[in-house]
Structures are given as C-alpha cells and as structure tokens.
Image: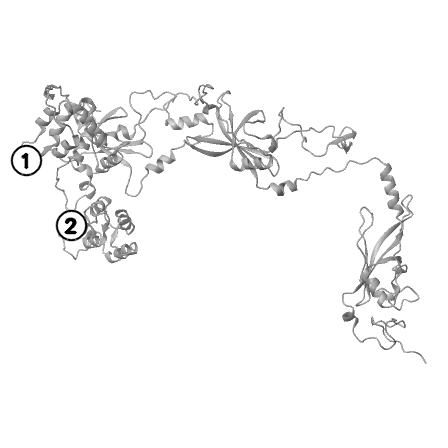
Amino acid sequence: MVEKVKPNMLGVLSDRYPSVYARGEVIELPAWIAFDKQILTFDGFFQQSLEEVRNAPYAVRNVRVFFHLEDGTLQIIEKPQTNSGFLQGTLLSRQRVRLPAPMDDNFYDILDFNIGREIEVFGKFIKLTNCDKFTRNFLNRQGISVPDPINTPADPFLVDRAKTAATSLARKPNKTVDTFGQFLKNDRKLLRFYAYWDDRESEFGVFHDLEVFYYLADDTIEIKDVVSRGALKRSTGTLLMRRCKLPKRFTGLPNPGYNQANIVLNVLGGSVGTGRYVNDPLDAGKEHVEYYKDKDLSIGGILNVFGRNVVLVDADENTKKYYRDTYGVTSFVPINKPFEQSAENKKLIRVKDRELPPWNGFGSYEDSAQNCVTVEMVAPLKDFKKFLKYDRKGMDSQILRFAARMISRDQHNCDRKFIILYFQSDDTLQVTEIPFGKLTAVTFFARAPVFLPGQDPYTSEKPLVYTPQHLFIGAQVVINSFYFVLIAADEYALRYMEINCKNFPKSDIDLIMNKLRDKLKPIYKDFVSDMIPSDDTKAITYEQLRNKLCPIMGMDFTEQEMVTIARRFSLSCQKERLNKDAIRAITLTTLKRELWDDLARLREYFILRDPGRTGLLSRSTVYTLLRGCRFPVDIQLLEKILDVIDKDKNGNIIYQALFNFLDRNLCPMTDTIPLNVKSELWWASVREPPAGDLIDWCEFNKQLDLEYVFTDKPKFTNLVVPDDPIHI
C-alpha cells in the first residue's frame, strides 16, 4: 500500500514533513497568512574565477540570501563593496527556485537552508556562513539544529591589492574645500563698515564716502559709494568694488588660472594635441594669495583695495556686536574724516569743484554744462524737490503775476500793457502782452530763466537768475535788454507774499514797521502834526501817506512796502463791480445758453461726497465736483460763484445755498447781455490796486508805538523829494 503524499505547510507536494507536527495534524491555515512578512536571512559567499588577474585566481563575493516563508520564494542580494569591479546589487530577484537535478521536480524549502550547507542557484554554489537571530530561533522551534557561524575566507584579490597599495607611492588625493557648512551657518549675515577714500590728490579726484560690506558666508567684500548732502546720506548704487574676495597685497593683474584648485603640468610634448598632462602634486606653480578675513577688519584699519587705500572709520551696531561676541573687542571709537578734523590738528583740504569752460551762448547753460561733464548726450537734471514743493496744489498755483509797463523813450511802448508771470517751480519768467483793442494775450517773452543784469554770462560760473525776492511792486526787470517796471500784482501774489513774509521781506509788515519806526522817531512830532486828519473820519488817503513816507524813507522804501501798509491798515470799502445778484444773473444766462439743466444729478454728487449730511463742503471739493460734472462755465466765473456763495465761519461752502443760487425757479433773474467773462472778471481789468484808497490813521499810529518827542528837529519839508518815488 502506497502512502498518500500530502502537501506540506508551504503548499508544496513533498514526502518530507516538519517534525513539530505529526502526520495529518498540520494546521489548516494558508501559508500567506501563517507566515506573512516572515523571512529567513542567511549570509553566504561564492567564488568567481579571475583568470585575467595576477596572484588572484578567484574572487570571493559576499551575498545575503532571503527565503520568504509565505510563498517559498528566494532572493539573493550581493553586499556592496567599494571598487570591486563587479556589478553588484540584486543577483536573483524574488522567485521560486528548483532544486538541482535529479530533484528538480521540487523547490527549495526551509529544510534546505542552514549554516554550513551549500545551495546551487543557476550554476552558482553559495556557501551559507551565518544567519540572523530570527532565522536561528525559527529553525530551532521547528526542531532544526543551527550550527555556529563559519568564517568567510579572505579574498585574494583584495589582499593582493592591499599589499600593492602599501608598497606603491601614495597618489595625490582630490582637494575638496568644504564651504557649504560656512554658507549654511552664515548665510545672509554681513558686516558693515563706514569708510572713505581720499582721491583728491589726483586730477579731478574727489573725496569718496564709502560703505564696506563683508559677507560672512563666503568671505567676500563689496564696497559702495555714498553721496552726502548735508545731514542726508544716500547710496548712489555705484560700486567701487563688486562682491569678490579682496587680496591683501596687490602687485598687478593675476595670471590665468591662479585661483584653480589643481595645477596641470605638461610632462611630454610641446603642443596641446600631442602633450601629456598630469596634476602637479607639489603645487609648484600655484600662486598662494592671502585674502582679507573678518579678523583683519577693524575701525581705523586701512584696506588695500587694488592699490587704493580705504580707511575704516566706523561700523554699525550689528557689526560691533559680532566683534564683541566673537573676538571680545570692547572698544569701538570712531575716527574723524579729514574734513571733520579741527584746523589746529590738520589743515582743511577742500574738494575742488569741477572747472567748466566758459559758456558760449548756444543753448541753455545747464545743457552746455551737462555736455562738458559727460560725452553721452544726457538731458540736464532738474531740481525735482523744488518742483514738487512749488508745483500747483489744487487751487494754489504758486505762480506770481505782476502788471508791468515798459520803460522806453518811445511813448507808444510806455503805454503798452504787460503781464509778467514768475514760476517758482523752476525760477522761470514769462511775459505776455495785452494788445490794444484785443482781449487775447500775446506772448512777448516765452517761459525761460532770465539772468540778472550787470554780470558777464560767458564765464564758467553759472550766471544768477531772477528769484522771487527780486520781484516786487516798484522793481525794475531787464528782459532781453527791455526794461520793465512792476506797477501792480494780483491778489494771489500779494497774499502769497504776505503769508510767506519770511521769504519776501518787502511784504513783512513787522519789518516794515520797524524800518518806519527807526526813521520816524527823530521827527515823529512833525510827522504826526502834518498827518492827523482834520475831520472826524480818522482816515487818510493812500497818496497822502505815500507822498509823506517816500521823502522820509528815501531810497530804502519801495512801492511794495507801501502797498503792504495800505493792505494792512485799509479802510477803503471798494464797491464791487459785480455783486452777488449780478454774478447769479450772468451764471443763469450762461447755463440757459448752454442748455444745462442737471441740478438734480449735481445734488446727488454733492450728497455722495458728504456722508455725514453736514451740508458743508470745502471750497476745493466743490470746485472739483463742479469741474468733474462738466459745469458749463468759465473758470473765472466759477471762481466768482464760489466767492459769493454763503459760507460758515471756517470757510466751508453751504452747498444748499449753491443749489438755490443755480435754481432758476427761485427768484428768476433777467437775462444779461453777452459779455466776455474772461475779460470782465479778470483781475488786471481793475485799474486801482486792491489795497484801497483810505488808510486807518489811528490803527497805523498805534502800530508805530512811538512817543511824542517835543524837541526841535528839522522838518521833513526841507528834504529833497526825488522825481520818481518808485525805487528798486
């Protein structure tokens, strides 16, 4: 009777059984569940013949054998070995392996693996020498005895190579400089020093304020140029030295390849193609360069920047903290620059200004000077800060307008009307003429800077131009050999000069009264006796006070100062040429002629700009809204409308009053005849200055604040009165 063959625990048909279970009592669990992730691991080796290697007939290749219990698969991996000369890694991918013939009907099982046994895998005989702890315990529980580990024989190839390496000359190792650690430690960390380079000894040399940056990540240095303007210092972005390592000694340009790690020697041949090159193990041809480090930088030290002496004068707080923590430096006393030292210790050396050739008269002076500075055609730089300061800001135009007449022997020229506009943003003048019988102004002199008379323009020094301090009522202006005298100014110019009286002394009432006080104190008795009004009005005329003060003050008194006095102590109540009703009639007639009837939408825009429903808006806001809504009136008429509209105590416009003003259904007005608004509402159409004719004598005398002097003084009636009381 033939015994029935049963499958073993791995599901393989075999007549061999494990000793842990009796026959027929094997547990009925699938192997992939019972032995999931359980692997038997063995160390082994096999020999491979090396017929081409001397003194090494074979090589010993160490492997690791993995037997997976869940499916009986086998995997062999060779241990990595440096410079072995063989392809290493996975020698046998995971698969089931059959036993050698004549047992090739069965596959390798756990009974075939143990220390000291040999397995044949595709023609390679692998000797098992050791196993891990799990494998030993598993086989012992199965009743399989596991012997002690076996020593792996030595590899004759490796032994021979070790003997050869010991007896041969050592080769030069590859040079590797580890800078990555320094980069990771000190990335984005830098030291900043303040320095200077005095180059005034050379031709066209200047004094350079510098900033020295030391990068701790790679020991490189960068030097920037700094421009000083008073207390303000700013970086121009110009680099005196771009970021690089700075050598301590500079003898000239370096040779090619001086900073390479390896030096190549040509040992055979003279040409590139037939030569033989090897590395220089002794670095005989390498240039050893010493570079500046952080330990070489200190306040007061001098850096040799490729032949230029850069002196370190100070450092920032982070740099001081770094040297205090790293090197224990506690003294950081800044040193003075050459121009900051006192004259007793060192003679001051001033920077020489660039001397330009004389101006030849072609083009503007700035354009010619810019062409002398650089060969490249570049437009001259403008004072942008001054432009931003004096440019138009809303209703404030920053433009001073004066009425002028020409001084000429021809009476026809003296009767001509001129307007002189001064633009403070760039110190330029523009002269326009109002021809007889015409309403359109004609440009007499285009906008340009005007040189002051009495100076030679064809020099290397820039000629002086007219400034706002040279323009006042009574001043003479010479423009292209034409002489003008300023006879009046508009309300904006007078008010602007009075507000900015520090820049316009002839509109400063305090300075004027102090000047009058000094002149009138000796003759105050006679002056008061002649100027007291005879009636009870307590007012004197403008001409009466002017004719009295001009002889007393002499050449030191101008018409601008007289106008300032008249405006300050004015009693005149000039009758307006156009009152509120007249302005409303002109406005309604203009709107009717332009077919404008959009008051409801205009009201919505005003309410939208007033979320608090206060009913008040500033003048500038109202002006912007009307212009943005395309209100069909001229600017001059719009300014008059805003002047007559009701306002609160703070000057804000009550826009409901503006709506009532523009509503033709409320108090209808008679249509007016067509008129030129630009001419009728123009400030120059008023013949008399806005100062008025009457002056408050009591207020003027009170402001003088002089006591009566009852001493005999020469009366001013004996003084000589000049022909023209208007002086420059």
Question: Dot 2, crowdedness within 10 Å: few (<14), some or many (≥20)?
Answer: many
Residue 366 vertical placement versus 2 (above, below): above
Which image quadrant for residue 460? top left
Q: Amino acid at mark 2?
A: Ala
Q: Is residue 156 above or below residue 502?
A: below
Q: Position of residue 609 (x, y in %)?
A: 30, 54
Task: Return the x and y of residue 655 as percentages of the image width and height.
Answer: 23, 53
Q: Amino acid at mark 1?
A: Asp
Is 530 drawn above or below residue 398 in the view shown? above
Say which quarter of the image contains residue 166.
Answer: top right
Q: Earlier in the sequence, mark 2 or mark 1?
A: 1
Whether residue 165 is visible, yes or no, is yes
Camera-near label (2 vs 1) is 1
Label 1: element kind: loop
641, 481: nearer the viewer: 641
Instruction: Tell me the residue that label 1 is attached to.
Output: 536
Identify the disc placed on residue 585: 2
Which one is in front, 267 or 13?
A: 13
